[in-house]
Image: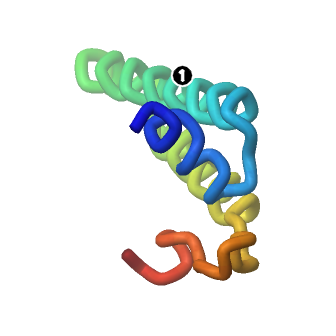
Amino acid sequence: MLHRLFLDHPRSVGESYREHLVVAAGFGAMLFAAGFACMIHAILPGLFRTTGSDIIRRLHRHMVTHRRREPMPDGNVPASETGE
């Protein structure tokens, strides 16, 4: 059970646990920054006019360009490639 929780998903996207930790934490930090910018923008509309959407677009580009495209060693295609 612990093996599945910690290792299956990182392996399915071609990363070690540590690599996945760094990438996912980085995405989380950027999403936090985007959310914070949006909250400030809600209060002061003249500030951070495009910051939140700029960050989201940048994260999306990174995720799409780094997506694993080939089957995993067990022959399965990652869920992100099958639309699941």
The quadrant of the picture occupied by the C terminus is bottom left
Return the residue nearer the eye: 42 or 14.
14
Q: Quadrant of residue 21?
A: top right
Q: Which residue lies at the image location 40% right of the left edge and 38% below the top edge?
A: 1
Q: Is residue 14 visible?
A: yes
Position of 75 relative to 50 (above/below): below
Residue 68 lies, with reference to residue 5, above or below; the image says: below
Image spot of residue 7 (x, y percent): 59, 40
Residue topped by disc 1: 29
Tell me if residue 51 can be seen: no
The residue nearer to you, when weighing 80 against 57, is 80
Residue type indicated by callout 1: Ala
Q: Position of residue 59 (x, y in %)?
A: 60, 47
The secondary element bearing badge 1 is classed as helix
- Establish if 79 lies above or below 63: below
Q: Residue 82 location in percent, x, y?
A: 48, 83
